[in-house]
Amino acid sequence: MAQLNVSELDFDNIKANLKTFLKSQTEFSDYNFEGAGLNVILDLLAYNTHYNGMLAHMLANENFIDTAVKRESVVSIAKALGYTPRSRRGAISKVNLSIVPPASYTSTTLELSRDKPFSTTVEGTSYTFQPTQSVTVNATTAGGAGPYYLYGTGVLPASATDQKGFYYPVYLTESAAVAADTGGTGATTYTFKEYSGVSFYLPNSNINEYKETLGTVTTNQSGITVDSGLAYGRYTGQASDSATTTQFNFPLLEIKEGTRVENKFVVETANLQGPFVLPNIAADTDTLRVRVQNSASDLTLITYTKSDKFLDVKADTKTYWCEEGADGLYQLRFGDDIIGKKLATGNIVIVDYIVSNASAANFAKTFSLSSAVAASGEVRTLDTAIAGYGGASKEGVDEIRFNAPRYNTTKERAVTSSDYEALILQSNPNVQSVSVWGGEKNDPPIYGKVFIALNPVTGSIITEADKDNIKTSIIDPKTPVAITPEFVDPDFVYIGLDINLSYDPKLTTASKGEIESAVSTAVNLYFNTDLNKLNKSFYNTKLHDRIKAVSESIIAISITSRLQKRTTPILGTTTNYSIQFNQRLQPRELSSTHFNITSGGSTYKVSLVDVPSSTVVPPLYSGTGTVNAVKTDGTIITSVGTIDYDSGTITIPSMVVQSLLGTELKLRINAVTQRDVRDITTQALVRTSDTSTAAVVAKPSRNTVLTLDDSVANSTINTKVGLNVSATPEVEEI
């Protein structure tokens, strides 16, 4: 008897298999299987088999994290691996808040509650920020001398009776002691306080009885702006008066975007361990505060802490676990008196947290407080230390698929480089990629250390506070005692591209501009998916294939790459610059943005160029050259350093950049790889003591990030567009 093939999922093939099977039966040997009635029955059987086969196939896929499609399946598998997907995260900012209370406020302490709202606006939309925790500070007092007077013309009054141009009596205060009559010395910033409490800052190194300074000073009293210079002091013979100011300072106060909400759950016999479901999909679980009230009549509150593991959790440990449920909502579970303390019937679980707008408030930088903290009439000074950063959406399916297995392999310890990477990525949404290596892999080796490079996601920053938190909360508890972690900043290399392509207009309805736009999109997608991360290399063939796939009309593609490094000079200061391109460089292709330099008592607008030595010859172009500062007409002003064409190293031992042009904050240095260099790798080229080219060896450069050059063409500062795509219509000859 013929066997029915049941492994096929294609409908037509299933139907053909059924026909073959029936034809092999003697009862149906002379049947017309194309007849209407039997054909309908075969269709029905094929459809049924097809649907059942597809269902079984899909169900099988949902059992594996690599093939699962539905989020709840991926989350469930991740749960079995001990991994909890990251919730939505609100943007974080840090502000400096100073409050001068009215005389009626007599307390020596002041609490800023965690539910005190700060407001800001980003691109026309208003957002609310909340302190991550309540903060209480002690009062500080400052003594001063006064009254002094502000004079807004930059010219001192002719006599004590000439008060023209003077505004408001003020007290001069500073952190150090202030002499009664002559003001203070030795500080760089003095605060002038009006009788009403209004304050502003004036930079100066010395205060005398009558002192004149230039600059712009703006007060918030009646909108007065002094922009033509400022004189300040006390009239000769005027009696001194003293003033003491009480002030509460909240330095580097951490605030987080979102609105704080509270949910309450009454514990019943059937749900002593939960789950208790948070009803808001936008909950930021990093902000959870969980307290348990004994009962409706007993208001005693006990705080429970979050746990991510079962180890070291005892029977009486007051802890909870947070996990994502099948509906995408986060839920809380409690212990069973074996692992963690069990809840009792009648307990009330009180949960408060922040509901955030993910990344929408990143870059928020101007904040305000609409209500008093101490008392009505207080004077608040609020400035932003760190703009909003770190806001992120809930962890996506692909991220979970990547992170969960790697997190599971760590087994709650940080030993291997992959352990460090998994632990850091799991808890830091503002980190896009991580590179970790042992100090023994450095050149020369540094034993007893592990080096960590963190690459932030686009639009985010990684602060020193973030690094400290990673070290103290994630690394130190899980790393061997003898190992010291050290953070290394990522080294960004910006790749500029000139892409020229020809296409056959007969094979496409797209215009020249549309093809160029589509190619630009493909290039950006290549960098976003394959690069912009640590330890990722640029491959010319990969980009070529991406561009070719844009349209079948594209006949030929030419890709020329340029490299750019950016450094922030300390203006007016002799500085040593070491620029590492880590690629073999083409002679006479070095350039830079314009900057001002002083030589021989004169200041010149210059840029950097290279001049190879006589031994740098084709085809290898091996050796070194000089780096010169030249004027726009090519005149050499001075030699500032050297360039090694083999390793791509530029060394400038002592250059003084007086100023940059326009609004530029960084000096951009450009180079071109040698003609036979097609790919741009993240390897460092190191020259040994041997002078032959074979002695230039490649070693991993573990903190390099390759990204697309975003420069805009500007002839004033000497920049060209980072990505230039040019398409030429051309009929292909047959």
Image: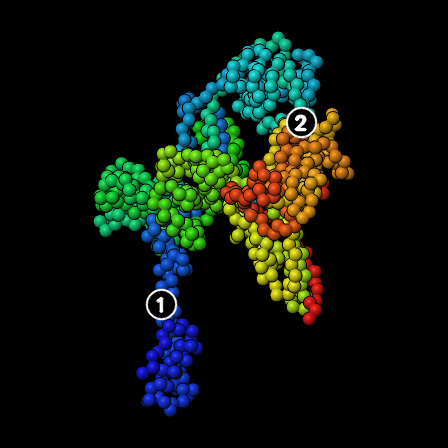
Alpha carbons under labels 1 and 2: distance apart: 77 Å
Give the image location of residue 247, x and y in percent. Answer: 47, 23
Q: Residue at x 74, y 32 (%)?
A: 637
Q: Which residue is mark 1?
A: 56
In the figure, 298 relative to 327: above or below?
A: above
In the figure, 456 relative to 100: above or below?
A: below
Q: Is residue 478 left or right of residue 120?
A: left
Tell me which corner region of the image, top left, top right, bottom left or bottom right, holds residue 114.
Answer: top left
- Look at the numbered disc 2 and give the secondary structure of its residue: loop
The amino acid at mark 2 is Asp
Q: Residue at x 48, y 46 (%)?
A: 432
Q: Quadrant of the image for the N terminus?
A: bottom left
How many numbered badges does the structure rendering display? 2
Q: Which residue is mark 2?
A: 227
In the figure, 645 relative to 166: above or below?
A: below
**1 vs 2, front mark:** 1
For label 1, the crowd category at 10 Å Cα-Cα, with few meaning under 14, some 14 to 19 and many 20 or more, is few
Give the image location of residue 705, x and y in percent. Answer: 54, 44
Q: Residue at x 23, y 41 (%)?
A: 315
Q: Nearer the viewer, residue 493 or 79?
A: 493
Q: Quadrant of the image for the C terminus?
A: bottom right
Give the image location of residue 510, x and y in percent. Answer: 65, 64
Residue 263 visible? The answer is: no
The amino acid at mark 1 is Ala
Q: Extreme bottom residue here?
A: 30
Tell me which corner region of the image, top left, top right, bottom left or bottom right, holds residue 416.
Answer: top left
